[in-house]
Amino acid sequence: MDILTQLLQGFSTAATPINLLWCLIGCTLGTAVGVLPGIGPAVAVAMLLPITAQVEVTASMIFFAGIYYGAMYGGSTTSILLNTPGEAGSMITAMEGNKMAKSGRAGAALATAAIGSFVAGSIATVGVTLFAPILANFAIKLGPPEYFCLMLLAFVTVSSVLGQSTLRGIVSLFIGLAAGLIGMDQISGQARYTAGVSELLDGIEIVLVAVGLFAVAETLYAVLYEGKTVETQNQLSNMHMGKSDWRRSWPAWLRGTAIGFPFGTIPAGGSEIPTFLSYATEKKLASESIKKDFGTVGAIEGVAGPEAANNAAVTATLIPLLTLGIPTSTTAAILLGAFQSYGIQPGPQLLQSSASLVWALIASLYIGNVMLLVLNLPLVGIWVKLLKIPKTYLYAGILIFATVGVYGMRQSAFDLVLLYAIGVFGVVMRRYDFPAAPVVVGMILGPLAEAQLRNAIAIGEGKWSVFIERPMSLTLLIIILLVLFLPRLFKLLTKNKPLAS
């Protein structure tokens, strides 16, 4: 009952005219971003981060949540019509959705994707409402040793999951940790690694790093390496689902939601795994008459299930982000930076220290789901027109927006030089497959982990054994070791397994 009361209070905050407007703007921008190939929600949120200095915190978080959500909805449009997934989670949608579009059934594919996203997002938001307070109440009992181990778990999982190589992910993390040390020491007040540059005494702004590594670097990389691509678009048919489509879609929506939600709550590699699992499940459960549609004319289950799994996983990532401060996706890492730019640290204390903000954010997810359904079904023709924008104009606009936004924060020319230096560094990272998200996570959580480590050692009277003497910190350390070594052990055992004769 307490949860229901807090949720109703959240609705009263989120449903104010100004917050509804920010939610609508976020959902609209997110959908537009999702439709445009090559620009994902991480780039969009990073590019728009500088506005957090000018907007009230609740409205800002609702705005970014709208972008985050909307981009996942919009990604299906590009996948179905162009066979060009805007996000990794839409790759599976492209497999069957584009086949349906080529068979003249693009409208049915887009409709099942939009409605499935709404169903999955709504159910997953109920899950966030129910489970986030439970996890937060448990986590609030943790002390400095547990907090440090929790942040260590975040470092390990983000480095291992967000990228193709664990080694590259760890290197990116250490770059972020080193950057987080720049500035004044929290306890002694001594300047660290500033090289005599007075502008670095307050440290490097996380917003500046996020914009440089994502918006600027992605744009420069696309211009330098991706070149000019010729894209062909399938004809858009009426957004209509027949009785057979409805009958085949709704079980896939529910199964996809059930698969996607658990994966969003754990650091398991974003939405790619649940979408693949959902697709495999639908293909396995399909009758012989339907199975022949997969990979040929396109099976609607192959669109409905993965889209539901994708959106359920995306919504569920808010549980570890809000209650533990652990981002399980690249965009969640950027959202963590948005919180910190307001001096708010997601974690076990958040539901107590900023309860009104959290519940307004959760309430906005319910509202945003309805807005996105309205935006995606009747207005899909408008979103398709965005695909005609020349990429040269698009990339130029991103760079201009990023430059003006960063300069507007402190009116500092040094910030602009640093922005483009970080952007060029981001291009090098992208070129050699070093993930950018661990850099952001290292910068945000590094100073906090340092403070918790000092507190933990003080509690243990200088003894490092404090981490293994406390049951919860020991459990977390064991989980960290499992995350590091279990996948490699499984891979090694699979590789050495003799082939059946």
Image (spheres, grey):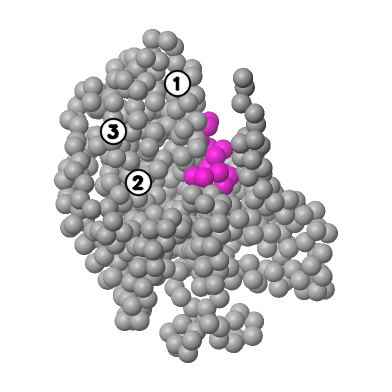
Q: Is residue 353 above or below residue 302?
A: below
Q: Residue at x 38, y 9 (%)?
A: 289
Direction from residue 297 to residue 448 in the image, left or right: right
Q: Is residue 11 above or below residue 90?
A: below
**Residue 180 at what x, y percent from top left?**
53, 72
**Magenta residues, dominant SS class:** helix
Q: Which mark is residue 283?
A: 1
**In front of the other: 28 or 88:** 88
Q: Residue at x 44, y 73 (%)?
A: 205
* Mark 2 vs 3, N-terminal side: 2
Q: Residue at x 27, y 53 (%)?
A: 226
Magenta stretch in the rendered image: 256-270
* Mark 1 vs 2, N-terminal side: 2
- CB atoms of marks 1 and 2 within 8 Å: no
At label 1, which amino acid type do we have?
Lys
At label 2, which amino acid type do we have?
Ala
At label 3, which amino acid type do we have?
Ile
**Residue 398 at what x, y percent from top left?**
26, 61
Q: Secondary structure at mark 1?
A: helix
Q: Which mark is residue 80?
A: 3
